[in-house]
Amino acid sequence: MGRLSTFALACALVAGFAACGRAAEPGPAPGPIRVIGSNGLGCIAGAVELPAEGPGFQEIRSRRSVFWGHPRTIALLELLGQRARMAGLPDLYMNDISMPRGGPIPGHAGHELGLEADIWLDVNPKPVLTLEQRENLDPPSVVRPDGRAVDPAIWTEDHAKLLRLAAMLPDVDRIFVNPAIKQELCQTTTGDRSWLHRIRPWWGHAAHFHIRFRCPVDQPECVQGAPIPPGDGCDATLQWWFDQLALPPKPPSPPRKPPPLPAACRAIMDAPSAPARH
Ligand SMILES: [Zn+2]
């Protein structure tokens, strides 16, 4: 049973279902595992859920049902927690992965296939918090307000260590961070710089990073994005992001109706849930 449905059940028993303000959501579509579509438009069957905590990590806002992914994704996130602990880092705060069947999550572009996750850039020592305490945390930005560099009062070598550990995981396609974070890594990384290739600049991502794993090789319906250009990315393509900061802000684009999910996702979205796990 997923933890949202566990919570909903507790609400029904204790406080009355309607008072909880949460609708029961379908669980994952039963296996076999199928990953269909692209990161920005797709779905997954046979997803599994990351535990609320494990060696080296704790989930944040874990009462939402957004911690589902391909079994390989879940295993690699757990491996990252273990490697972070072995490297002397405090628990990682894991955030959104995907919904039980994938598809769009409000506030995210991506996270639709169970192959992507957000992890906070928080390397401060932290106690094990209760699920309730984890509902109202907000990670601090590690980037200066002007966006041109990391904040030296917050950024530490452990942030770089965490990003290196994440980029060195198997099957990583790319990791999105704020351009100021990429710039800092470009300027300070010595020795092996090969992993910088997979660290990509993107707007936001100043308090968390976004990790995307490659399509599993046994998933022909999973659409792999275009490969990253060769090189470490510490070049004019990085400078482009800072040049944009000097331009007047663009007016917001009008809301667009999201395109429909791939036709093969319909059966996955409509499938009865798998029997509850005990
Ligand atoms: Zn993300």
Image (tube, grey):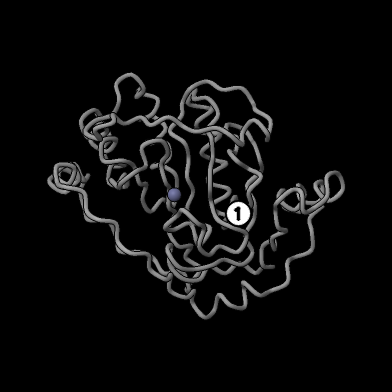
User: Residue at the right extreme?
Assistant: 13
Residue at (52, 20) in percent of width and height: 125
Numbered disc total: 1
Report the residue marked by disc 1. 68
Residue at (22%, 56%) from the top-left corner? 229
Asked if residue 144 is positioned above or below residue 9 in the image, the reply reads above
Rendered location of residue 265, percent (x, y):
55, 75
- Image: 215 above or below 191: below
Q: Residue at 44% of width from left, 58% of height from top?
A: 110
- Circle 1 crowding by C-alpha within 10 Å: few under 14, some 14–19, many from 20: many
Outermost residue, bottom side: 263
Q: Horizontal placement of 177 versus 112: left or right?
A: left
Which image quarter: residue 214?
A: bottom left
Amino acid of disc 1: Trp
Q: Which residue lies at the image location 49% right of the left edge and 22% below the top edge?
A: 88
Pick the front one: 129 or 117: 129
Label 1 sits on a secondary structure element that is strand
14 vs 266, left or right, is right
Q: Quadrant of the N terminus?
A: bottom right
Horizontal side of residue 278 vs 244, given as left or right: right
Instruction: Residue 22: give x, y in percent of width and height.
Output: 70, 53
